[in-house]
Each structure stands twice: as structure tokens, then as C-alpha cells.
Amino acid sequence: MYILTESLFTTSIIAVLYALVKSKNWQDYLLICALCAVPVLLRPNGFIVLLGVLACFVLQNRHLLQHYKRAIIGSAIAGVLLLLLVLDRYLLTTFEIVETYARGEVIYAAKIFSVPADGVVLPTERDSPLLRILYFVLQNPVFFFKLFAAKLLVFLAYAKPYYSAIHNAGIILIIYPLYFFAIRFCFKQTNTAARAFAPTLFILQGCIVAATSEDWDSRFIIPLLPLLMAFGMAGLYQFVTSGIKHTTLQSRAVV
């Protein structure tokens, strides 16, 4: 028995984003990192929120951090090793990830979108979870990357063939344009470090889902939708206002 915590996870992500937007100096990031303890404790993948905050911090202080390259690289390596240890000893022990690979599942416990798994070589069961995944990738590289790409695409697409036509139409007409405007905003809005938050979370969450499994109800993308809406609407506003300014300038030039 387990409890799904997506709603609380979603709320905590929104709270962290709000704190990031309101942050003014590096001291504020200490409080934001403390706030990240909430999503970290709520979900096994909650660490992505902390990594998103760190990405914003690095972006905001990239010129100052040039003087501490060695310390930063050393800390990053130590952090990755610690994360791998936690994944191997705790977070991956309850999941049969390699077994889902062998079934070619894109969506967990479902045949839809599945990738044919003929001739797949399985690692031995005595190895640790992380080593089993590594051995599987090395022994079946083409199959793994096909499966990885399929899961990533299904995760980002969000629409599913078993959803209603109205549901899928809403996703296509609302969510997909928001992707465009959110990406545009992140590239255009260079005066705020918070612009790194949403891309970091989407990339990390997408890679986690692609390396494990998508769920039938798309619950892994749901906590990220408020970010997509916030960044997408900001991008839409930026697009409209820049268009109005451009039109106004042209009109003045003609006059």
C-alpha cells in the first residue's frame, strides 16, 4: 500500500517557484534550499526541485562562480556520487525497472506503445539495482535508447489514445502552444535566473520517466503543468507585447 503525493508535490513546486521569483540575493537561496526539503521528502524524485534551484543560483551568480570552478566541480562530482548511492541503496530497491525494460513497456503494465523486446539480454539478479540497469544498457544499447525515446515522447506528448477526444483536443490546443511560448520565454527573458527552473525540472523529470516508466494517467507530468502554464503565459504575454511595440514603432516611423 502506498500514498500518492502528487498534489502536495505540485503545491511545493509552486511555492518554490514563487520564492525564486521573489528572491533578490544569494541569502534568499538559503531559505529556498531549506524549502526544497518539502518536495524532497514528498517524492522519490523530489531532489529535482533542489537541482532546479541550484541551476537558477548558478545562472544568477555565474560570473562570481568563475573564481570557484574547482570547488564547484568537486562539489558537483560529490553530489552526483551521493545521489547515485542513495538511488542504488534506497530509491531503486522497490522498483523492478529492468523487468519493465524486458517487457518493452512504455506505459507501466500496459501494452500500448510497447517496443518489441526480442533478443533482449537480462543481467543477473544478484547485482545492485543501478548495476543491473547499467549492464542492461550496455548489453542492449539500441533497444534501450528506442525505449528511452518512446517513453520521453509519450511523457511530453501527454495526450493518450484512450483519453476522450475532448481531453486530447484540449491538450493539443492548450498544452502544446504553451510548450512553444514557455521555451520562447526561457530564451528571451534573460534578466531573471528563475527562467532556468522549469527547463531543469522538465529535463530531469523527463529523463527519470524515460529511464523508468510512464504511468497510464500521466501523473508524472501533472506536477509540472503549473510551471508550464506560468512560463507559457509569460511567454505569450511577452510575444504579444513585443508585437504591439514593434507595430507601434513601425507606425511612428511611417508618420
Image (cartoon, helix red, strand yellow):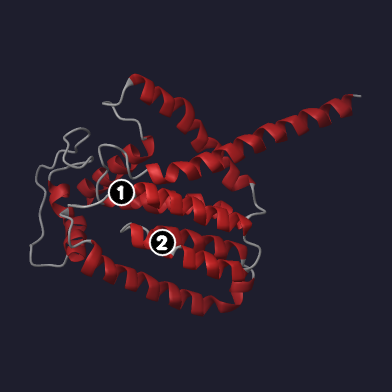
Q: Amino acid at mark 2?
A: Val
Residue identifier under label 1: 209
Please give the name of the residue rendered at 42% of the width and 29% of the height, measured from the top-left corner.
Answer: 171
Q: Is residue 183 in view from this perspective?
A: no
In the rendered image, residue 32, in percent from the top left (x then y), is placed at: 52, 64
- On screen, residue 43 above or below 7: below
239 or 94: nearer the eye? 94
Q: Amino acid at mark 1?
A: Val
Please tell me which residue lies in front, 65 or 21. 21
Cα separation between marks 1 and 2: 21 Å
Q: Position of residue 128 (x, y in %)?
A: 16, 67
Q: Position of residue 35 (x, y in %)?
A: 48, 63
- Report which residue position mark 2 lands on: 38
Q: Quadrant of residue 27?
A: bottom right
Precedes in sequence: disc 1 or disc 2 = 2
Q: Residue furthest top?
A: 165
Considering only vertical position in the picture, is 132 above or below 160? below
